[in-house]
Amino acid sequence: MISVAGTFVRPRGAGGVLEIERTGPFVPSITLPGIGEVVVTEELRRSLGRSGLKGFGFETVVKRRIVRSEWNAWDQAADEPAEFPESGEPEDYVLGQPHSMEADEQIGDLWALDLNRDAQTHRERRIVQHRNQIKLVTSTWHGQDIFGAQGAGFIYVTESAKAWLEQNVPGHLMFEEGGGHGGRLNSQFSGRVRVTRLGPLVQCPRRVA
């Protein structure tokens, strides 16, 4: 799946390791490259470690392919990207290009958040029309500041985590209120988080012949 800034996420294998293929050397401090996945740079990992936020750890991300691209220097106000892959297919910004060892080394280590996902969700019917119809069962949440839940690919955060992320990675994420089921939400609970605009390749248009 090609996602923000040209990231291809490989499904976690038997070993549970997250492998990515993406552009470099520029990498946003935090990205949500796959459903329920949060990837951070080494610098942000250190900051999170000092933040006082609790309930999560870090796992090494395998950089399977890093493609050199200076997409972050392109004119973000332009109607089209400065470059198109020869095929015209968005995934070939990454998958159609060779690995760059130099860009790989410049990126440094990337880390996936190791989130607790024991919390439960509730839905009135198996197939819902909107994500707001999926509710967190608040009694199954045990105070983690950043966490996942069974039955949904959302990332949930507390008010403390939301405030910290807004201060330390401004403009990278957007938040929406997360509804609860089976009781009132704890006053510290904020809601779901999802990625927002990170650059000109958030959506890669296909070339029109």
Image: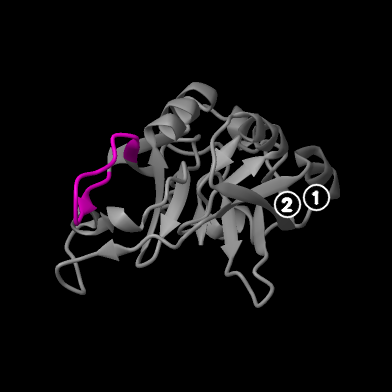
Answer whether residue 76 is visible to the viewer in this image: no
- Residue 47, percent from left and from top: 65, 30
Q: Is residue 53 left or right of residue 79?
A: right
Q: Residue at x 70, y 57 (%)?
A: 97
Three-letter amino acid code of the residue under disc 1: Ser
Q: Residue at x 58, y 59 (%)?
A: 8
Q: Which residues are magenta?
A: 178-190
Q: Is residue 146 left or right of residue 107?
A: left
Residue marked by disc 1: 100
Residue marked by disc 2: 66
As drawn, which residue projects farthest toward the bottom? 14
Residues at circles 2 and 1 in contact by the CB criterion of under 8 Å: yes
Three-letter amino acid code of the residue under disc 2: Ile
- Residue 29, percent from left and from top: 60, 35
Residue closest to the eye, 60 or 69: 60
The mark tally for this picture is 2
| Relative vertical location of residue 31 with respect to residue 128 in this rendering, above or below | above
